Image: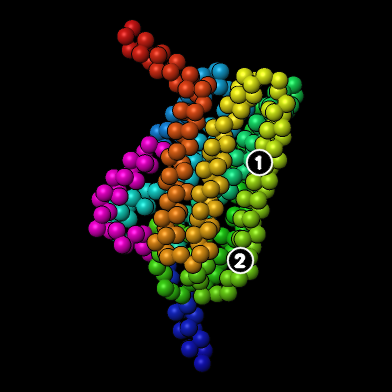
Amino acid sequence: MEELVEGELRNRTTVHEFILEGFPAVQHLGGIFFMMHLLAYLTSIMGNMLIITIIWADHRLQTPMYFFLSNFSFIECCFITTVIPKLLTIFLSGRQTISFAACFTQDFIFLFLGATVFFLLSVLSLDRYLAICKPLHYLTIMNPTMCNLLVASCLALGFFFMVVPVAMLSQLTFCGPNVIPHFFCDFGLLTNLSCSNTRSIEILFFNLAFFVLGSSLVITIIAYSNIVLTIMRLPSAKERQRAFSTCSSHLLVLSLTYSSCVFIYVKQNQESTLDSNREAALVNTVVTPLLNPVIYTLRNKQVHQALRDTLSRVKLQKYH
């Protein structure tokens, strides 16, 4: 009897690695998809790094809003780097193995940075509220110490909210199968592979994720409701246009980020195919990070002007 129990325990703990399936239906087009996603990845990285460089090089952009934006761009770079390199490998070579520890590490970093992005978006909303609705107190409240504290708080909240469910899930039993029908280690799919009862962990994760998204959305709605009311009270159309232009880029990024998450949520709750879920995840990990720097550089007049000034200085140095 003891031998049977020991044998069963050994069989139930045999999973030491997982297999990322990727996109088997289009694997014959892997080379094309590799080039497309590599170009998107490099463009996104270079775009976000360009924003960071311009902000730190131009003294006119060294304000609280652009400080938060530079942190946002840096975290976006880290966020997509968590999953895209593995995706590129899958497009080139097909399904890929990933160790147990690496899989849960990827899952944690993905969720940690994703939660941090939402907290940072709410901080950017709060920053715009203070700048437009409380202009006389703005620089007093948003001093360098407060700015650093807010960014550190976003990182800390993202870490502590996501480390608990991922750590709990990693302690469960995984006895096979070990194929993840995705291009990265998704929390929901990992719960499906566990042989243990995951209901309590799934409830905890859902509540934490709901709090992250809900609290960020509530702060954003309250902030922008007050911003709209304040802008509408301005006496001239020119002042209203100027005030709105300072937050238009942020509004576009907010819309893009939240809509992509809602898109994924709706897809998954319509009993959609696994291929549809994987395609939906690409929106959040490839398309949105690619468009964010484009929005901030092309629609933001200050960043646009700083970019032109930087290019002009580079040309002058080249000729001299």
Q: How far across and down, in percent of the image, does residue 161 sit?
A: 63, 53
Residue at image mark 1: 220
Amino acid type at image mark 1: Thr
Q: Is residue 120 left or right of residue 289?
A: right
* Region rendered in magenta: 17-44
Q: How far across and down, in percent of the image, does residue 59 sit?
A: 55, 18
Most common secondary structure along the magenta stretch: helix
- Residue displayed at 54% across by 53% down: 262
> Which disc is residue 201 wearing?
2
- Residue displayed at 51% across by 53% down: 263
Q: How far across and down, in percent of the image, does residue 52 sit?
A: 49, 29
> Which disc is residue 206 wearing?
none
From what the image shows, is residue 165 above or below residue 149? below
- Mark 1 is surrounded, within 10 Å at the Cα level, by few (under 14), some (14 to 19) or many (20 or more) other residues, namely many
The answer to which of 140 and 167 lies nearer the viewer is: 140
Magenta highlight on residue 30: yes
| Distance CA(mark 1)–CA(mark 2) | 28 Å
Under circle 1, the secondary element is helix
